[in-house]
Image: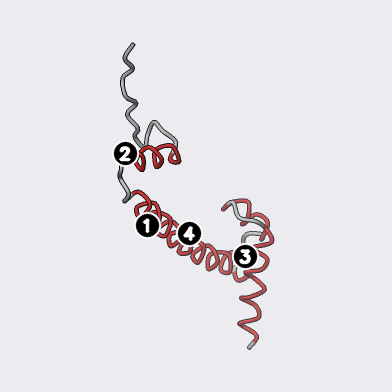
Amino acid sequence: MRVAPIRATRTCAPLPWFAAYRIIRGERSVVEELARERADAKAAEARALAGLKQAAVVLVSAAGSVSGAGFARGVSVDGMAVRSWFGRALRADCR
């Protein structure tokens, strides 16, 4: 009985299996591609986090229109992280 080969694509296979499949096929560039994707994702996260920190300072501490806990829930961030942003912002303003 012949079985048709499985075609792995990013849409139908989980990424770890897809990466392993490509390595088995001899595509060694998969490691570099995944490393580049990870670096891009980390950079995007850093940019988004910087924007969220500034938004929190403006909306919570300056304008007072949103509570820190409400802001944290709204943007899916840990409440303690938001509190630490205010501590740093307030300390920087006091210098």
How packed mark 4 is, by other alpha carbons closer than 10 Å (few <14, some 14-19, many 20 or more), is few
Q: Is residue 3 above or below residue 84?
A: above
Residue to which mark 3 is pinned: 60
Q: Callout 2: 10 Å neighbours few (<14), some, many (20+)?
A: few
Residue at label 1? Answer: 36
Quarter of the figure that contains the C terminus: bottom right
Q: Which residue is mark 4?
A: 45
State how many labels appear. 4
Going from N to C along the chain, the mark reached first, 2 or 1, is: 2
Question: In the rendered structure, which disc, 1 or 3, sits on the residue that comes first in sequence?
Answer: 1
**Location of residue 27 in the rendering, given as x and y in whole percent from the top left corner:** 30, 45
- As helix, strand or loop, the secondary structure at mark 4 comes to helix
Say which amino acid is labelled 4: Glu
Which amino acid type is marked by label 3? Val
Residue 25 - label: 2
Q: Earlier in the sequence, mark 2 or mark 4?
A: 2
